[in-house]
Image (cartoon, helix red, strand yellow):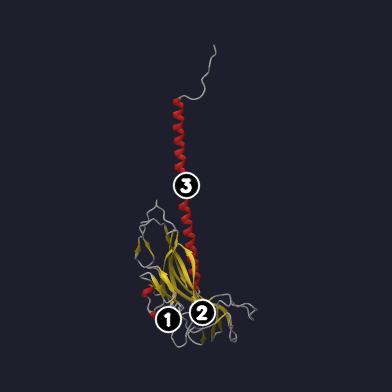
Amino acid sequence: MRNFKQVGMTLMELMISMAIGVFLLGGVTVAYLAMRTTTAETIALSEMQQNGRMALSLLTTDIQQAGFRGMLRTFNTNVIAPAPFAADCNAGLNGGSFPQNGLGEFPVIWGRTLAVAGGAIGCVNNAVANSDILQIKRATGPALPDPLPVGALDASQFYLEASASEGNIFAGNAGPLGIAQAEIWPYRHHVYFVTTENVDGIAVPVLARMELINNNGPQMQRAMLLDGIERIRFAFGADMNSDNQIDGYLDANNMPAALWQADTKVMAVRVNVLVRASRPDNDYQNTNSYDLGDGVLFTPNDNFRRMLFSSTVHITNRR
């Protein structure tokens, strides 16, 4: 008679093994989900940090150089410039792209807080509410070589030809006047604002900029710069009594017109940039309050993560 040896697992052993397997699988699943959540959060924070730093960098460069005009003492006299044009970004009297003789001071920096969404200053469309518009006009370096090499001028851009006593703003396809002892600089007119664009059904805030170009004549062209910039707010450090000191910081809508029109009056700008994640996180509720410098707290109470970036920028080209 043969003896048979039993092999395999008993029912009890099988059930215990299955229970251990389910327990281990559950632990792995929990770890995976936690890791995925952490990774998504890390990516969102990294994107916001990058976009916030880039926004501050763009704004800082323009603000620091606001009003730069090479050797030219002032934009207000002895400057030949193109005539006003339709759909210019015009902030008021002599507030367009080019200085116009006889219209008073030519403001090189100007701002406004929009109470309602929509258009502003003749060129901005679909701007968001409770964010600022910032207008800056300046020459930008480096100066072009003298004498000008063939092809040095870009026909789609404008330039400032400037000596100490006179200036000429001209399109790249027109050429300079030949002012004695003058330098030639690229000339810029930028208007920053926040708008939105639809991405997969989500309204994503975007930092945008209107830019002066030459296209068979001057026109303002929109450039979409950075996703996730939800609001920009500025406070302007002004010299109110001509003692060459900042007497206080004023919000854009509280700045008297006389301070805009004298480019020696605005000495510094406090910049606040609120950055929002491009997508909501349903596991996160944002109940934080953000102060963008005006003392009015913004509490979104939604599922988007945010970061606030702030800096004070001193204008280096005041005269």
Counting from the top left corner in percent of width and height, residue 116 is at 36, 70
Q: Residue at x 48, y 56 (%)?
A: 46
In the rendered image, residue 117, in percent from the top left (x then y), is placed at: 38, 69
Of the residues shown, which amino acid type is indicated by label 2?
Pro
Mark 3 burial class by Cα count in 10 Å: few <14, some 14-19, many 20+? few
Return the residue nearer the eye: 257 or 18.
Answer: 18
Of residue 239 and residue 124, the one placed in the foreground of this image is 124
Amino acid at the residue labelled 3 = Met
Label 1: which secondary element? helix
Give the spatial CA distance, label 3 vs label 2.
53 Å
Question: Which residue is labeled 3 in the image?
Answer: 35
160 above or below 4?
below
Q: Earlier in the sequence, mark 3 or mark 2?
A: 3
- Which circle, 3 or 1, is nearer the viewer? 3
Q: Which residue is mark 2?
A: 218
Q: Mark 2 or 1 closer to N-term?
A: 2
Q: Residue furthest front?
A: 1
Mark 1: give few (<14), some (14-19) or many (20+) Cα within 10 Å: many
Circle 2 — which element? strand
- Residue 217: where, in percent of width, then height? 52, 80
Residue at mark 2 to residue at mark 1: CA–CA distance? 23 Å
**Answer yes or no: do the residues labelled 3 and 2 have beta carbons within 8 Å?**
no
Q: Is residue 123 above or below residue 302?
A: below
Q: Which residue is mark 1?
A: 261
Q: Residue furthest top?
A: 1
**If the image is split into quadrants, where does the N terminus sit?**
top right
Of callouts 3 and 1, the N-terminal one: 3
